[in-house]
Image (cartoon, rainbow, N blue to C red):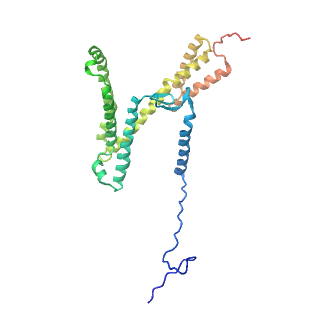
């Protein structure tokens, strides 16, 4: 039985025999989808910032200016000095350690691709405790950087220290009580939840708690800033602009209207109190746009 001789590819010299086919060309496939589109938009946005920020004016200078001779770094309205860069160093340390432990080590360990480095530095039983350890390392670095700038104990004013301690000790005790009140729920939850899910649920609860505190801060900032200013302007307009008695009466009228609607509306409509109040104010502005107290003003001629 004789073996068959492989046929020559077409177009090849008949005087030379070859057992290889022509190499097929490889083309990169076009990637489409949501994330590919987001990547393209991100590239355009970042490059636009990179090339556009030097031309953006801000307070008589560039919006982003690194003035190396003067050792000043301007980023919009902020001015950073070289001694402020330990904050950036702390952020970079947190980012680097988080990427190493949480993205590299944890991911490869869970995928079964561990190596000598991961086995030496990564302990899977620690879990989310690495977040605490990373923040501890960052705080320690900031402490070491700031330690030379601390004044010596001999240079401190002893009388001032005693006065500060007498003033701050009660506040510290009250603060400790508040901290216990804020964190006791996590300790209690560990014994109330099943042991196999307690740590994970407490971690999720703590993250949601931090987010809720952040949202509360934004809400309080609005209520303590924009909302009182808005109601003060409305009260002044109700009473009549330029009239002090009118502003007082307008503020009292606004408060009475809010109390009335809060007590009159059912519980499921309590969130619409401001809406009803603003409707009444809008009707008042239509009927009497000059306000309750009409202030006579001289016309400019």
Which of the 4 image quadrants contains residue 205? Answer: top left
Which residue is farthest front? 15
Residue nearest the viewer, comparing 2 with 267:
2
Determine whether, in the image, residue 7 is placed left or right of residue 92.
Answer: right
Can you see residue 197?
Answer: yes
Determine whether, in the image, residue 90 is placed left or right of residue 290.
Answer: left
Q: Position of residue 75 (x, y in %)?
A: 49, 31
Residue nearest the viewer, comparing 100 with 127:
100
Q: Residue at x 38, y 48 (%)?
A: 103
Which of the 4 image quadrants contains residue 111? Answer: bottom left
Determine whether, in the image, residue 8 is placed left or right of residue 91.
Answer: right
Q: Position of residue 36 (x, y in %)?
A: 53, 51
- Say if 265 sits above or below 129 in the image: above
Q: Residue at x 37, y 39 (%)?
A: 94
Q: Position of residue 89 (x, y in %)?
A: 38, 36
Q: Split into 4 quadrants, where in the image is the C terminus?
A: top right
For the image, the number of numbered tags is: 0
Q: Residue at x 45, y 86 (%)?
A: 3
Q: Position of residue 53 (x, y in %)?
A: 55, 35
Can you see residue 257?
Answer: no
Which of the 4 image quadrants contains residue 190? Answer: top left
Residue nearest the viewer, comparing 133 with 211:
133
Determine whether, in the image, residue 274 is placed left or right of residue 160.
Answer: right
């Amino acid at each position: 039985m004789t073996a068959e001789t492989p046929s020559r590819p077409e177009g090849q010299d008949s005087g030379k025999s070859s057992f290889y086919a022509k190499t097929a060309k490889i083309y990169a496939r076009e990637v489409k989808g949501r994330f590919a589109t987001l990547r393209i938009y991100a590239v355009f946005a970042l490059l636009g910032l990179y090339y556009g920020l030097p031309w953006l004016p801000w307070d008589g200078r560039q919006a982003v200016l690194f003035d190396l001779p003067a050792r000043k770094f301007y980023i919009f309205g902020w001015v950073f000095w070289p001694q402020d860069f330990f904050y950036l160093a702390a952020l970079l340390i947190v980012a680097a350690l988080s990427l190493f432990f949480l993205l590299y080590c944890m991911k490869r360990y869970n995928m079964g691709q561990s190596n000598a480095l991961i086995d030496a530095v990564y302990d899977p039983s620690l879990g989310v405790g690495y977040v605490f350890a990373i923040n501890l390392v960052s705080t320690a670095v900031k402490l070491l950087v700031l330690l030379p700038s601390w004044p010596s104990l001999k240079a401190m004013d002893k009388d001032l220290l005693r006065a500060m301690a007498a003033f701050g000790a009660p506040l510290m005790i009250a603060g400790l009580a508040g901290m216990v009140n804020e964190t006791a729920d996590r300790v209690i939850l560990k014994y109330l939840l099943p042991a196999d899910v307690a740590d994970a649920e407490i971690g999720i609860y703590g993250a949601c708690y931090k987010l809720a505190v952040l949202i509360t801060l934004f809400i309080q900032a609005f209520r303590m800033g924009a909302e009182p200013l808005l109601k003060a302007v409305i009260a002044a307009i109700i009473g009549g602009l330029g009239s002090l008695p009118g502003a007082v009466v307008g503020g009292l009228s606004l408060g009475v209207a809010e109390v009335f609607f809060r007590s009159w509306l059912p519980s499921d409509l309590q969130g619409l109190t401001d809406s009803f109040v603003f409707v009444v104010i809008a009707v008042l502005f239509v009927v009497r746009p000059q306000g309750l107290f009409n202030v006579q003003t001289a016309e400019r001629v």
